[in-house]
Image (tube, rainbow, N blue to C red):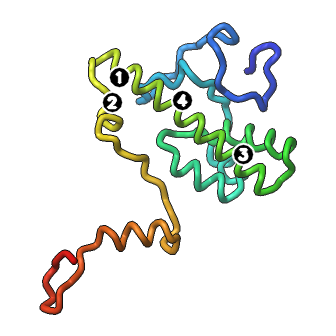
Amino acid sequence: MMGKGMSAYQPWLSTPSQRPHPQPPPSNERTVRHEIWQRHEGDEWSAFEQLPPSIRQRLREHAYDAWSVNALILWRHYKRVHGPTRRAERALIRYLDYCERLEREAFATRYHSSYGTPLPHDAAVASILRYTPANTPTNQASLCANKPRRTSSGQHGSS
């Protein structure tokens, strides 16, 4: 399953010279992901359930399918390096963020070369939707700042 000299915990990002690109199985995936990443086989749901809650949350927020089996392989590596600690969780989340940025850049480049315009999401300077706890100060401040205030007559107005 893995190429010669590759270990299970290596990042699934690799250069084309390191491994051949097999044809992906038939699916509705119409992106360049198979050109960037190596997807490890396994039970996605079982792998997802073995991850810590913070990592599962981050995978749910990932702009694209982060592939739970790959994340579990990485989690096992990070646990060996850092121990099963919050530090290991934060390190893996940072790595997932990095992978997401690489993927978005690849999609944007492919889109621009295909259509001659920026990826609509990037052109709109839209952010990736993330879950945030309702009681976080940042979230509360943004809700209050954007909420119109009611006047004494019950009408919405600006103040």
Say what amino acid the circle numbered 3 marks: Ala
In the displayed structure image, the side of residue 126 where residue 138 appears, left or right? right
Instruction: Name the residue that disc number 3 marks.
Output: 91
- From the top left corner, tell me how far across and down residue 130 is, in percent: 47, 54
Instruction: Name the residue that disc number 4 marks.
Output: 102
The structure residue drawn at horizontal position 78% and vertical position 32%, both measured from the top left corner, is 9
- From the top left corner, tell me how far across and down residue 27 is, in percent: 45, 28
Does 90 appear above or below 44?
below
Secondary structure of residue under mark 1: helix
The structure residue drawn at horizontal position 41% and vertical position 21%, both measured from the top left corner, is 109
Instruction: Name the residue that disc number 2 marks.
Output: 119
Say what amino acid the circle numbered 2 marks: Leu
In the displayed structure image, the side of residue 98 where residue 143 appears, left or right? left
Q: Tell me if mark 3 has few (under 14), some (14-19) or many (20+) residues whose alpha carbon lies within 10 angstroms of its own.
A: some
Instruction: Name the residue that disc number 1 marks.
Output: 111
Q: Quadrant of the N terminus?
A: top right
- From the top left corner, tell me how far across and down residue 66 is, in percent: 57, 39
In three-dimensional space, the C-alpha distance between marks 2 and 3, rounded to whole angstroms, equals 29 Å
Does 123 appear above or below 112?
below
